[in-house]
Image (tube, grey):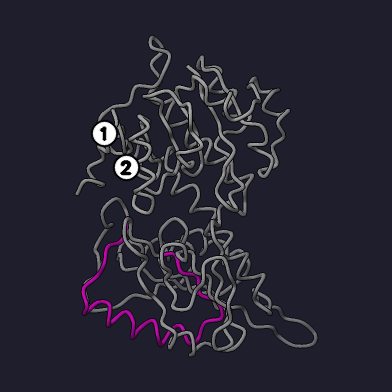
């Protein structure tokens, strides 16, 4: 069983899909590891560290030759996988809805593509969930990015020269990223509030010491949406939420938006008119900017100023914490493959519940139900 670890080719991608820690663990299972030279450099992992862990550090063609499983962070360009044997697995974040043509190309090449972001939100798959591990870091980094752009202090400071008021931080969307953003902003001493369409998140917000901002007398989602995500709300709820948010956002110094709907553009949470109500020097961080953005005027990869408000739209936020993001991502991959490792066959054998959920292609065809709807 040969596992190949590739150097990422996407612009700005600094993560790597295996670390020396997980290389050792795969070898203990009986696998042979081939790591493309330079794969971990941007995540502060030298080639020698992989050699010391027992992997062969080789060029791309050698890594791919005879590989049974290919590990990546983002889906590689199909053209860069020339020579891969039919039936080889590719386990990575494949962005199936956004990169459908690439998925079709994997199928045509005979690759069995496994989309890690399609991992079901079930208890036994929590340790395999790349969305959760990477979103956790995104929520943390969003607060640090906001602090870096904000021209004032976060905590209240009582000094001989007078008192500095605590920054007011508003988190919109209380999933994994939102919860970490709340916790981080609280640690920095900010006055934090948060909102979500899922009423079940109110207790989570309170547990972190933040103030919940919720629409009253109009039904939202009583619990979790499908797979733990929110879904689009009724026009009545959206109107009530917009009115509530407009009144609240005008008083905030920093807003962090995290709302995503799988397979669809990110919902618009903040309009240009709402941005205009914030005071000059305020900061908005849009973590959904690459999926269309929660904030009108947000630009992927840029920090723009509208009405005196900075709108931060960094791409690939987890990659900006490459070492920790790689450590977590690589553990997700190891936990996934090792959970199904068959000692007799010397390879993982997926079950139906998780296998059918993550498998995009097989035997030259696209087979995932979510892509065939």
Q: For this rendering, which residue is in front, 72 or 229? A: 72
Q: Residues within 10 Å of mark 1 (few under 14, many from 20)?
A: few
Q: Residue at x 39, y 22 (%)?
A: 348
In this rendering, position of residue 307 left or right of residue 124 = right
Q: Residue at x 29, y 50 (%)?
A: 227
In the image, which residues are magenta? 229-258
Hey, which quadrant is residue 125 in on the image?
A: top left
Contact check, label 1 and label 2, Cβ < 8 Å: yes
| Residue 103 position in % (x across, y down) | 36, 42
Does residue 203 lie above or below 373 as drawn?
below
Nearer the N terminus, badge 1 or badge 2?
2
Q: Which residue was labeled with disc 1?
A: 353
Q: Residue at x 33, y 42 (%)?
A: 104
Does residue 175 lie above or below 282 as drawn?
above
Hey, which quadrant is residue 91 in on the image?
A: top left
| Residue 368 position in % (x across, y down) | 26, 40
Q: Residue at x 41, y 62 (%)?
A: 291
Reply yes or no: does residue 185 show up in magenta.
Answer: no
Name the outermost residue toward the right: 160
Does residue 61 lie above or below 291 as drawn?
above
Reply yes or no: does residue 233 show up in magenta.
Answer: yes
Q: Residues within 10 Å of mark 2 (few under 14, many from 20)?
A: many
| Residue 165 position in % (x across, y down) | 64, 83
| Residue 246 position in % (x across, y down) | 40, 85
Does residue 365 lie above or below 100 as drawn?
above
Q: Which residue was labeled with disc 2?
A: 120
């Amino acid at each position: 069983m040969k596992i190949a670890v590739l150097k990422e080719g996407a612009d700005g991608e600094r993560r790597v899909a295996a670390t020396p820690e997980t290389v050792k663990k795969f070898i203990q299972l009986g696998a042979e590891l081939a790591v493309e030279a330079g794969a971990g450099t941007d995540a502060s992992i030298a080639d020698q560290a992989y050699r010391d862990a027992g992997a062969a550090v080789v060029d791309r063609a050698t890594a791919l030759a005879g590989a049974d499983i290919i590990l990546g962070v983002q889906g590689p360009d199909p053209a860069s996988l020339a020579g891969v044997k039919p039936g080889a697995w590719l386990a990575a974040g494949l962005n199936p809805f956004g990169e459908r043509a690439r998925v079709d190309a994997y199928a045509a090449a005979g690759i069995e593509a496994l989309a890690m972001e399609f991992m079901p939100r079930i208890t036994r798959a929590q340790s395999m969930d790349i969305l959760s591990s990477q979103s956790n870091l995104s929520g943390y980094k969003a607060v640090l990015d906001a602090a870096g752009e904000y021209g004032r202090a976060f905590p209240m400071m009582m000094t001989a020269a007078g008192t500095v008021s605590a920054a007011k931080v508003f988190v919109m969307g209380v999933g994994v990223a939102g919860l970490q953003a709340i916790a981080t902003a609280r640690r920095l001493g900010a006055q934090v509030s948060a909102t979500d369409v899922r009423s079940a998140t109110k207790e989570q917000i309170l547990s972190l010491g933040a103030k919940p901002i919720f629409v009253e007398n109009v039904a939202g989602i009583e619990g979790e949406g499908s797979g733990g995500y929110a879904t689009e709300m009724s026009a009545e709820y959206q109107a009530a939420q917009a009115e509530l948010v407009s009144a609240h956002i005008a008083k905030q110094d920093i807003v962090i938006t995290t709302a995503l709907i799988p397979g669809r553009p990110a919902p618009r949470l903040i309009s240009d008119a709402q941005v205009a109500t914030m005071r000059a020097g305020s900061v908005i961080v849009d973590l959904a900017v690459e999926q269309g953005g929660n904030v009108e005027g947000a630009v992927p990869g840029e920090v723009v100023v509208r009405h005196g408000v900075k709108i931060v739209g960094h791409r690939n936020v987890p990659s900006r914490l490459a070492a920790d993001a790689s450590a977590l991502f690589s553990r997700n991959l190891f936990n996934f493959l090792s959970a199904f490792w068959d000692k007799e066959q010397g390879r993982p054998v997926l079950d139906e519940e998780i296998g059918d959920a993550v498998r995009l292609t097989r035997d030259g065809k696209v087979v995932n139900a979510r892509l065939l709807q």
